[in-house]
Each structure stands twice: as C-alpha cells, then as structure tokens.
Amino acid sequence: MAEAKELQAPFELVAEIHKTGKLPVVNFAAGGVATPADAALMMQLGADGVFVGSGIFKSSDPAVRAKAIVQATTHYHDAKIIAEVSKNLGEAMPGLDIKQIPPEELLAGRGW
Amino acid sequence: MKIGVLALQGAFAEHIAVLKRLNVDVVPVRLPHQLEELDGLIIPGGESTTITKLMVNYNLAHKISELAKKNFPIFGTCAGMIVIASGVANGKIEPIGAMAIKVKRNAFGRQVDSFETELAIPALGKKPFVGVFIRAPLIESVGKEVKVLAKLPDGTIVAARQDKLLVCAFHPELTDDLRFHQYFLDIISGKR
C-alpha cells in the first residue's frame, strides 16, 4: 500500500505486478533491430515479441535475414542456435553516423 | 506430472502460467529433445501458419505426430487445434493429422468479430465455461471416434476429444477458470 502511494499508482495494479512480475499489457520491442542477436536480446530482456521493419528490408538479403530473426526470436535462450542462424546473412541494415548527417537534417536542429 | 507447452509462437506463456497454478512441472518445448519424458503436450493458440512452419524446422512436426500415434496426450487450443487436425478447409496449412476432425480457420471473421460467450460443457460440470474466441477456428466435421464436448447454440462444434487428444477452438488459458486444463490433466492420469 505504501509502495502504491509512493508510485501514485492504483494499489490493485501494483499488487498484480508484484505477483506476476510484469505489466498486464503485451510489450513489443521495435526500432533498430538489425540482427538475429538484437531480436534475441529484446526477448531476453523480457519483451513479448519483436517488430522488425527496416532491419529486414534495408539489409542485403531480406528473406534470409527475416527467417534468421524469426528463428532467433523463438530460440532466444539458445546461444548456439542464434550463432548458427546468424551465419551468411549478407549485410545488415546500415547505420547512420551522426557526424555524416548534415546539420540542417538533424532532428535537434530542424525540429519535426 | 510433467507437461510440455509448444513455445514456438502464440499464447505459450499463458498456458505455462495456468499449468504452474495447477502445480505441475512445465517444460517450454522449442526443440525435439525437450519432448522426451513428458506426460503430455499443449499446443497453444497463435497463428497457425506460423506455428506449422516453425514446427517443420528441427523436425518437431514429425516427432509430435509420431508421439500422437503412440497415444500420447495432446491438448490443442485454437491454432493448436488446427495443428493436430486431419484436415483444414481453408489456407495452406499442413496439419499433423493426429485427430479425426476437419477444421475451418478464422471461421468467425476478422479480429473485430472476436467474442466471449458462456458455453455449456457437461464434461467440466454444471457451471458454464467462458469461451474466449479470438479469430477462432471451428470444427466442421468429426470422425466416429471423436466425442464432441461443446457446441455453440447454433450447433457449431467448438471442443472435442478423441481418446487422449483434446481440442478447443477458444482460449481457456485466458480465463481464471482452470477446469479445462484440469480436465486434460485428468485425461493424462486416466481419471477421465
């Protein structure tokens, strides 16, 4: 009760989360997931599932990478399988170095 | 008692939580060797195309269908019911064909048509059981070795049993009512 007051959250909700160890909503992870290991890491951190968009479609071989990411998400506890499916996937989605983005295109400068 | 829950995709975490409340040992099954020394297996709801595709990897589909032939207890809910059926009316699904039922996928329409309803299930006692139907399948026809356990008011078959194989079109793991899972445990221990 004291904890609920401290958090300014409903007592019933705090009690339920204490019991179950997680929020009563499905938690999907997304954004910047580019490799099978990234997806597995999200699952290990407690996500219920992973959305991957550009991580697949901006890679050099989307079909192969999509399959590998699905496998790694299912077998997220199994380092051996994650390593196996991570072989021969081609190039991952390229990252952008902040120094190479012109200042006028930086969100911090241009706003939305 | 040790029960496996096929944990490739779908509502496996919810089934595991129910089984823990019933004080049985639970094994999430993702690889064939995890099927060893189990007393029964639950195939959860989820997306049946995805589950059947993932079952082909690592030879799980073959192993599970071999077990089913040896009278191994399997409980399939929603997509899990589709997985163990002998025929699927629509969609490019290859079920393992363990149970003499023909099913139809997404039989009630799209997500917006998902619903909950009270079902009379005599095998579970007098109190109605709340069936949570989420883009649910239905059973179109059953073989003579299959016992129908529950129907909707219009006669649609939504739960059935064939020896130690148990199926339902809805999601018993999403309610607080443990009777359907208990019924499966009773089938395994030979009480029912």
Image: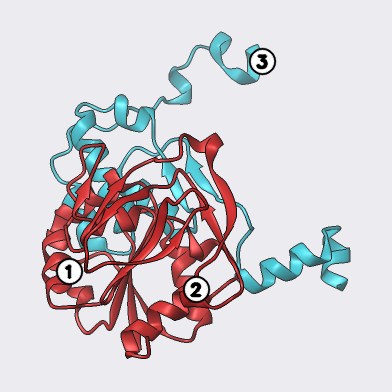
User: A18 or B9: nearer the eye?
Assistant: B9
Which chain is painted in red? B
Percent position of residue B84, x then y: 24, 59
Query: Share a chain, discs 2 and 1?
Result: yes
Give the side of residue B60 with respect to residue A106, left or right.
left
> Cα distance, mark 1 to mark 3?
52 Å
Residue drawn at the location 55% of the way across and 51% of the way down: A26
Q: Name the side, left or right, on which B108 lies relative to A107.
A: left
Q: Which chain is cyan?
A: A
Q: Are marks 2 and 3 on the same chain?
A: no
Marks 1 & 3, CB-CB < 8 Å contact: no
According to the picture, the residue beneath numbered tag 1 turns out to be B32
At 17% from the left edge and 62% from the top edge, which residue is drawn?
Answer: B60
Query: Does residue A59 appear to the left or right of B98 in the view shown?
Result: right
Q: Which residue is mark 2?
A: B122
Quadrant (top left/top right/bottom left/bottom right) for the N terminus of chain B = bottom left
Secondary structure under tag 2 reads helix
Tell me the distance, in whole angstroms, between the alpha carbons under discs 2 and 3: 63 Å
Asked which secondary structure carries label 1, the reply is helix
Q: Quadrant of residue B131?
A: bottom right
Q: Identify the residue at horizontal 26%, vertical 28% (top origin).
A: A59
- Residue B104 x/y as whole percent: 32, 44
- Secondary element under disc 3, as helix, strand or loop, is loop
Instruction: Read off the residue under disc 3.
Output: A111
Q: Chain of mark 1?
A: B
- The answer to whether dots 1 and 3 both sit on one chain is no
Tell me the kind of residue under disc 2: Pro
